[in-house]
Amino acid sequence: MLKSDINQIKNIDAIEKEYLTNELNAYNQNRIFYDINKLNKYTYLLPVVTNEMIKLLERKEYERVHDFADAVHNLPEFLVTDFWTADNYYKVYIKPYNKKWKDTFLCELKVR
């Protein structure tokens, strides 16, 4: 639907229109999410991640904020696709952050 909407915009440059359409092609728009149980199981992460980010920003730990944002940037994809398991997501994103900062953030993901 978004591609269709973009194509109907009159005051957008053709190159920009093509760029936007190509960017959307990177995502499989036919993919349907069926695992509501996974979403229910892990939505608790949203306020946990948000509160951690706020805490780091308040302490002005900007290098750590950068690393933390890098560690959690794919959290929405983890929540709504079957591409990531909790253990996989932990190993790829959270574990390196924890190792660098000697932290235990979201360690429960590796055993869920």
Image (tube, grey):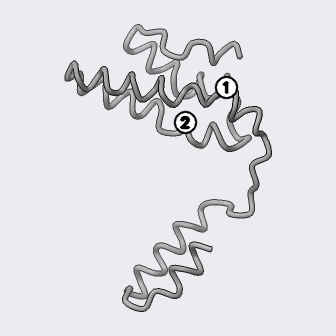
| Quadrant in the rendering for residue 55 | top left
Q: Earlier in the sequence, mark 1 or mark 2?
A: 2
Above-or-below relation of 57 to 12: above
| Quadrant in the rendering for residue 59 | top left
Q: Element type at marker 1?
A: helix
User: Residue drawn 52% across and 28% down?
Assistant: 93
Above-or-below relation of 45 to 32: above
**Measured from the top left, where is residue 33 in percent x and y?**
75, 49
Q: Residues within 10 Å of mark 2 (few under 14, many from 20)?
A: some
- Name the amino acid, label 2: Leu
Q: Residue furthest right?
A: 34
User: Residue drawn 48% across and 27% down?
Assistant: 47
- Name the amino acid, label 1: Ala
**Measured from the top left, where is residue 24 in percent x and y?**
56, 67
Above-or-below relation of 25 to 54: below
Q: Residues within 10 Å of mark 1 (few under 14, many from 20)?
A: some
User: Residue drawn 54% across and 17% down?
Assistant: 106
Q: Are marks 1 and 2 in contact (CB under 8 Å)?
A: no
Residue nearest the viewer, comparing 65 with 99: 65
**Quadrant that contains the N terminus:** bottom right
Count of numbered circles on the image: 2
Q: Residue furthest bottom?
A: 10
| Quadrant in the rendering for residue 45 | top right
Residue, disc 1: 86
**How far apart in space, not on screen, are marks 1 and 2 (Cα)?**
10 Å
Q: Element type at marker 2?
A: helix
User: Residue drawn 51% across and 22% down?
Assistant: 94
Residue, disc 2: 75
**Quadrant that contains the C terminus:** top right
Residue nearest the viewer, comparing 58 with 77: 58
